[in-house]
Image (cartoon, rainbow, N blue to C red):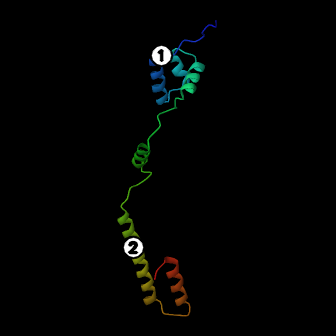
Amino acid sequence: MTKKTYKPWTDAENAELILMREAKTPTKEIAKALKRSPSSVINRINTQSIPYGKELTFREVVDTAFAKGEIEFGDVDTERKKQSKELFSLRNVLEDMERDIKPSKWFPKLRKFLKKLFGLK
């Protein structure tokens, strides 16, 4: 008969290991708290496939990014209104140019180029 060289893991130790891993506690500290060797803790982590740190849900990731100002939620209609105002102001600029600048040979080409560039009709 072979002699067991390790003590079996209890449910309480498993629960504590999982909680400490979710809190991203270093393996050496976990080993000290559970009175086990670091290698036994690592073996248990690998056999039980315990993730390091709590995995965030999609909702948590989005909420965190929103709180940090990395993303914004906007109104689609507001965005469209902004774009239409910009196009309207470009048309006004082009019309002002037509009025202010005396027509010459190059003006119709410039007008055509600007209309094409800004997608105006």
- Crowdedness of circle 2 by 10 Å Cα count: few (<14), some, many (20+)? few
Q: Is residue 114 left or right of residue 96?
A: right
State the residue position of label 2.
Answer: 84
On screen, residue 5 versus residue 82, left or right, reads: right
Q: Return the x and y of residue 53 as percentages of the image width and height.
A: 49, 33
Q: Amino acid at mark 2?
A: Ser
Outermost residue toward the front? 1
In the picture shown, does residue 11 fall above or below 70? above
Q: Position of residue 52 (x, y in %)?
A: 52, 32
Instruction: Choose between 116 and 51: the one closer to the eye.
Output: 51
Mark linked to residue 10: 1
Label 1 SS:
loop
For the point 54% across and 29% down, the residue is 49
- Give the residue drawn at x 45%, y 22%: 15
Question: What is the count of numbered marks?
Answer: 2
| Residue drawn 42% across the image and 85% down it | 95
Q: What is the three-letter code of the residue carrying label 1?
A: Thr
Left or right placement of residue 110 versus residue 57 in this view: right
Towards the viewer: 40 or 105: 40
- Image quadrant holding the N terminus, namely top right
